[in-house]
Every structure is written in structure tokens, then in C-alpha cells.
Amino acid sequence: MNEASLIGLFEATVSFGALLYLAALGEMIAEKAGILNLGVEGMMAMGAVTGFVVALQTGNPWVAFVAAVAAGASVGLLHGFFTVVLGAEQVVSGLSLTILGLGLAAFVGRGSVGQPAGAEMVPVDWGPLSDIPWAGPILFAQSPFVYLAVIAGFVTWFVLWRTRLGLAVRAAGESASTADAAGHSVAGIRLAAVAVGGGLAGASGAYLTLSLTPQWADGIVAGRGWIAVALVIFGAWRPGRVAVGALLFGLTLALKTRLQTFGVDFSPILLSMLPYLLTISVLVVISIRSRNRPSPAPAALGIAYRREER
């Protein structure tokens, strides 16, 4: 196992971790406001195809990125319309939007399969910092999406735990009637939270097609949206813990592509299963532990709020 291979593994771990972290942050924000969003996979797919198609048309990766965020936010608002405005069952709505998002993405991108990327997000040039042994290639030779994920994490933590807006968001997820009595618009907060969550999921999808694997293919998200949902539970609805979980799951995704470079003879089928086996194992362990302690999940998560029933 040589040094270059290890550096490549850790570099890929950070890249995949940022991909998962963006989507998981979006899910965490929505859940903090009381909205369970199981449509992350579909939102990522819509962000991925929108970013790729717009990059083909414009040749500008930043325009493509903005379009991908808007596409994810739009699907998020659709979920919000069903669950917040109409009071639909959140699990059913989320699963429906996953199916819708995956199908619509396949339809929109059918003419883009196999085409070269119109534009890519190139790694940020940090000058001499990129030449630092080990830390340089791992931390200072990454896509702009990685640094976006770091900034988004800090901003999310600050807003949720250090501002009045964050207090209102958390109140909407813990006790919607209390937030309403305090003068906050529960519907407005929840719609905004799910839109922001969808936008971050769209950004995560764009990371796939504009940077990590600059191409479009049906099924390119490959279940990573479900891993993001599990990460929120793994991280106990805390941005820092979610980040640690994202790096752990990012390592499993990196091993899938890098383990054979170490000369390890391991079944590629089992390697593909590894991230999802870890997801199931984590959920089982958390379920067992939660039997004897209070759940850190927002108390009103998944519960529709109707003001007239307050």
C-alpha cells in the first residue's frame, strides 16, 4: 500500500463525503422544521440532470449549478405543497417524489446520455497550500462543491443554533402550536426549510454531473439520497455529527473505487454493497440504542400542522 494510493483514497473520501453532506444537510434542515423528506433521491436526480443539461446548453458550470439548485428547490416546494399546504402524509409524498424525480430525470436526460460534459467545476487552486504533503491534495485540491459543503455546514449550524430564525425553525419542528402562538408562520417556515433542503439536494446532484463524474446516465445517483437520509439519523440532527458520518460513509464509497488499487482481491459486487450494508447496520444499532433513551429527533417530525386544530 503506497503513499499515493492512500492519498488518493483520502482525497476520494473527502469528495464523496461532501457529496453526501450537502444532501444530508438539506434533509436535516427540513426535518428540523418538522418535515420528513424521503424524496432526496429524486431531488438529487433532478439536480444532476438539470446541471448537466444546462452546462451543455450554456457552457457555464456556475449557471448550471444555479439551475440545479433551483430544480431541487422546486421539487422540494412541491413536497412542501403536498405536506404543508394540503397536509398529505409525508412518507407517501416523499416516496412519490422520489419516483417522480427519478423518472422525470431519466426523461429530461434521455438525449444527453453519452455526451461529453459541456462544462465542469475544476478544482480550486490554492497555490502553495496545494503542495503541502498529504494535506495539500486531500484538502486543497478539491472541487468547489467540497468547500461549499463546508460553508453550508457552518452556516446551517450558526443559523439553527445562534439566531432567532433558527430558533423558530427548531420550534416548528418541536412544537408547531407553540411556534404559531409565538407569532411564527409554521407553514412559511416549513415551506422555506423544505425548499432549502431541496436546493441542497439539487446541489449535491449537480456535484455528481459537474465534477465527480461529469456525464449523465440514468441511475447516476445510485441510492446516495437514501444514505443522506440515514446520515441525519446517524448524526442525531447535528451538523457536526452529520459531517463525521458523511466522511465515514464517504470512505465506504471511496473504497468501492479505490480498494483494488491496493492490490486487494475483493469482489466488486460486495464492494458495491458496502455503503448500503453500513447504512442498514447503523440504523439497526441506533434503533436498539434508542429503546432506553429519548430520541433526538424533532418531536413534531412527520406530523402535519393545521392551525384550526390548535
Image (tube, rainbow, N blue to C red):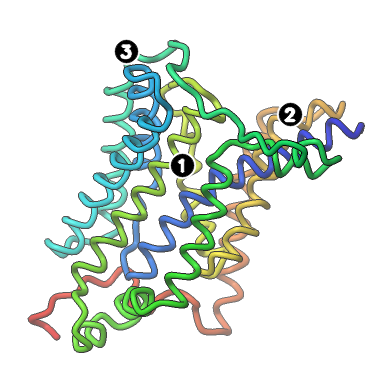
- What is the three-letter code of the residue carrying label 3? Gly
Which residue in the structure is indicated by mark 3? 111
Q: Are marks 3 and 2 in contact (CB under 8 Å)?
A: no
| Count of labels in the image | 3
Choose mark 3 or mark 2, whichever is in front: 3
Residue 259 percent across, percent down from the top left: 78, 32
Give how far across and how far down residue 9 sits, in percent.
Answer: 76, 37
Q: Quadrant of the N terminus?
A: top right
Residue at 77% in and 33% down: 8
Neighbor class of circle 2 (other Cα within 10 Å; few <14, some 14-19, many 20+) is: few
> SS class of the residue under badge 2?
loop
Q: Looking at the rendered structure, which numbered label has been put on residue 204?
A: 1
Location of mark 2 (residue):
267
Q: Element under label 1? A: helix
**Image depth: mark 1 or mark 2 in front:** 1
The residues bearing labels 1 and 3 have C-alpha atoms spaced at a distance of 22 Å
Measuring from the top left, give residue 47's x and y in whole percent.
Answer: 37, 36
Q: Amino acid at mark 1?
A: Ser
Question: Looking at the image, which is closer to me, 265 or 213?
Answer: 213
Q: Residues within 10 Å of mark 1 (few under 14, many from 20)?
A: many
Sequence-earlier tag: 1 or 3: 3
